[in-house]
Image: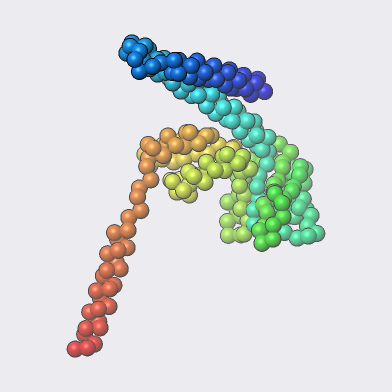
Amino acid sequence: MANVAAVMETQKCLESMLLKKMNEMESQLKSVSPKQDMDRISQIEGEFRSFKDLVYTTFSLLRQQISEILRSLDETEMRHRQKSLLLSGVAERSDEDLFATTISLFQRHLGLSDINDIIKRCYRLSRYSEGHVRPIVVQFSNQTCRSTVWKNKTKLKGSSMVLHEFLTKNRQVIFKSARDHFGMTKVWTLNGSIYILTPDGNRVRLTSSDELDKIKKQFPKPPTSTSTTTQASNLKLVQSRSRRVNKKT
């Protein structure tokens, strides 16, 4: 809350300063006539450049403060989600008992027993939408229990179900963007953080879109080559024409 108050105070000061300075410069410009000496005009131009630099500096500071606040809020929200996992691919029923269903699935597919006490709560994420199966948010008693289930997630391979970390909306966007750029096998999550295996073999941890943008610039996505596809199509066309010519002869 202190950070939010600081940003609001900066914004108020900025608005007041801009309004005052613009009024002053407007008055000065109105008072300048074409017959006045160049020194006066140069002075006003210098003041305008200084004012412009001040505005850019202030806006940059404001953006930094807002970015820090958003990062702090995201980290706080992620900490609240650390004891939860998302279970997708479980069909919905009107009379479903999610708690009992989740325990049964974990016992049957993950080979975990005596897990009644480790699950605190289960509920469907978002509102019901026909034709869309909502994932189940599984809240655990503590992070150790959650980690035990997470380590066994590969046992769900081959079924319709998948376990995901319960990422914040911001981190979901970063995760998807990173996978689109580097590939699904090169990007994963662990304890709310996003990791990338870069082309040079290093593992990089991400928590913000700014960090991802820097990595993307360092390792640009190679352009999709269509030359091979074009050559193959041309070869098929030539072969087809050749067969038609042979039939005619």
Q: Is residue 142 left or right of residue 40?
A: right
Q: Is residue 141 left or right of residue 69?
A: right
Report the front residue among 134 and 43.
Answer: 43
Residue 64 visible in rendering:
no
Which colouring convention does the figure follow? rainbow
| Percent position of residue 127, x then y | 71, 51
Residue at screen point 70% across, 49% down: 126
| Percent position of residue 167, x then y | 61, 41
Report the front residue among 136 and 225.
Answer: 225
Tell me if residue 125 comes above or below residue 239 in the rendering. Answer: above
Q: Quadrant of residue 118?
A: top right
Report the front residue among 171 and 2.
Answer: 2
Residue at screen point 72% across, 59% down: 92
| Percent position of residue 186, x then y | 46, 45
Residue at screen point 55% across, 37% down: 193
Q: In which quarter of the image is the C terminus?
A: bottom left
Tell me if residue 155 comes above or below residue 200 in the rendering. Answer: below
Tell me if residue 106 comes above or below residue 165 in the rendering. Answer: below
Residue at screen point 77% across, 50% down: 99
Q: Furthest residue to the right? A: 95
Q: Furthest residue to the left? A: 249
Residue 163 visible in rendering:
yes
Report the front residue among 147 and 24.
Answer: 24
Tell me if residue 114 comes above or below residue 238 in the rendering. Answer: above
Q: In this view, does 242 lie to the left or right of 73?
A: left
How many marks the image carries: the answer is 0
Q: In this view, does 231 lie to the left or right of 149?
A: left
